[in-house]
Amino acid sequence: MADAKDQAGKSYAPATDLVHLGREPAACHGFVNPPLYRGSTVLFPSFEALEAHDLPYTYGRNGSPTFAALETALCALEGGDACVLAPSGLAAVTTALLAFVRAGDEVLITDSVYRPTRRFCDKMLAPLGVTTRYFDPHVGAGIKDLIAPNTRVVYLETPGSQTFEMQDIPAIVAALAGRDIITMLDNTWATPLYYQPIKNGIDVSIQAATKYLGGHADSLLGTITANARAADRLKAGHLHLGVCAGAADTDLCLRGLRTLDVRLSRHHQSALAVADWLKARAEVAEVLYPALPGAPGHAIWKRDFSGATGLFSVLLNPIDKAQLARFCNRLQLFGMGWSWGGYESLVVPFDPRSYRSATAWQHPGPALRFHIGLEAPADLIADLENGFAATAGS
Ligand SMILES: *Cc1c(COP(=O)(O)O)cnc(C)c1O
């Protein structure tokens, strides 16, 4: 595959890499994009080849040129040694965890973690004899005081994708240095464009490619990239579990990758404009968007990340449920629904009080999570203004 860095030893900016990685037009009759390979069976040319079993591709589940194109691109972007694909972001999370834990092990997980990740640990890892302890996302170097002799994995997510706590990754990585502990980071919010976990000392980087990498709300995909230390165990776990992404979804993700840089810079710009407007509203107690100056986690975001995406939350001053319903129902441009990272704007109410365990969620009013899509920010702001008017009863 065309690795931009291999060609003439040049090193390109990430925006250039996104356009060129994983493509080889000369090997595809000149077509700009590689073809989509579907398939289970791969034919071997001879008895001897079948016995040797050393062709680049041997069976659809184990790899294809379509999967390899995306894996190659992500390895280069993330600075990883190996990348494997999964049929959803959650499947990437569970595959990564299962590849590294055994009965008797313990996993330490941030209390701000994506909720289905918590559900997997509590409902599936626990009965398999793997315990989970949750920790304050702001733990920083204090992580070293939490380590037990059987701690095998420390699992991070920054910022939390509902409550947006920024984790101090350099402090956590330094505190865990030299130990037999695998660090994992769910990097879905930042994407490999704005933060590269592996280059910053994390062993395993996870993306729900369903979100920004795909970018069009039309596919489900997860990616797991590992450094040299974790690559073999990741690949073995992925093989043994039989995890395999869909070819068409992988192809859509390759297409999404080509426009990631322009899409994300617009998401960032528009989200800042909308967040800034929301911050000044009397109905709003706090905006949780690390890219917004003065917001929680802003200093860490500015130090560690090279950009921000379009997802943030807002804490409202107390209103009743009927008022909240009027706000959401009045909105015309913000759809109500799960997932995010597509071109369209979304809103969902949430309440972390019921499922936090290491930290208490104090805010009494309702909370809303917004995804700022690619619409014109002035239209989005006018829509929100209508929503607030509905809350007040007009
Ligand atoms: C959506 C999401 C996932 C899961 O992705 P799916 O493709 O929906 O399974 C994992 N982590 C985070 C942070 C997410 O937002």
Image: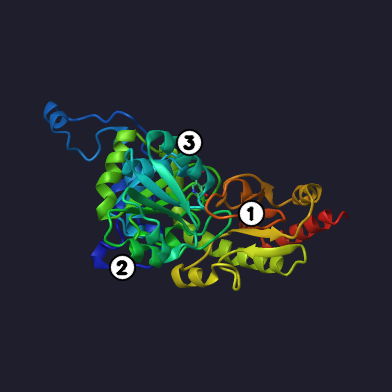
Q: Position of residue 359 (x, y in %)?
A: 55, 55
Q: Position of residue 119 (x, y in %)?
A: 50, 40
- Amino acid type of disc 3? Lys
| Number of residues whose C-alpha sits closer than 10 Å to that of mark 1, classed few (under 14), some (14–19) or many (20 or more) | many
264 to 356, vertically: above or below: below
Q: Nearer the viewer, residue 330 or 37?
A: 330
Give the SS element for disc 1: strand
| Number of residues whose C-alpha sits closer than 10 Å to that of mark 3, classed few (under 14), some (14–19) or many (20 or more) | few
Point 46% across, 68% down: residue: 306
Q: Is there CB contact under 8 Å for labels 1 and 3?
A: no
Give the SS element for disc 3: helix
Point 67% across, 69% down: residue: 276
50 to 381, vertically: above or below: above
- Amino acid type of disc 2? Ser
Residue sitting farthest toward the top: 47
Q: Nearer the viewer, residue 247 or 104?
A: 104
Image-quadrant location for residue 124 = top left
Q: Which residue is mark 3?
A: 123
Quadrant position of the C terminus in the picture: bottom right
Query: Rounded to the nearest whole Å, what is the CA distance between mark 1 and mark 3?
Result: 26 Å
Q: Nearer the viewer, residue 185 or 394?
A: 185
Q: Is there CB contact under 8 Å for labels 3 and 2?
A: no
> Which one is closest to the eye, mark 2 or mark 1?
1
Q: Which dot marks residue 11?
A: 2
Q: Which residue is mark 1?
A: 369
Total tally of numbered discs in the picture: 3
135 to 52, vertically: above or below: below
- Amino acid type of disc 1? Arg
Point 30% across, 37% down: residue: 239
Point 68% across, 48% down: residue: 335
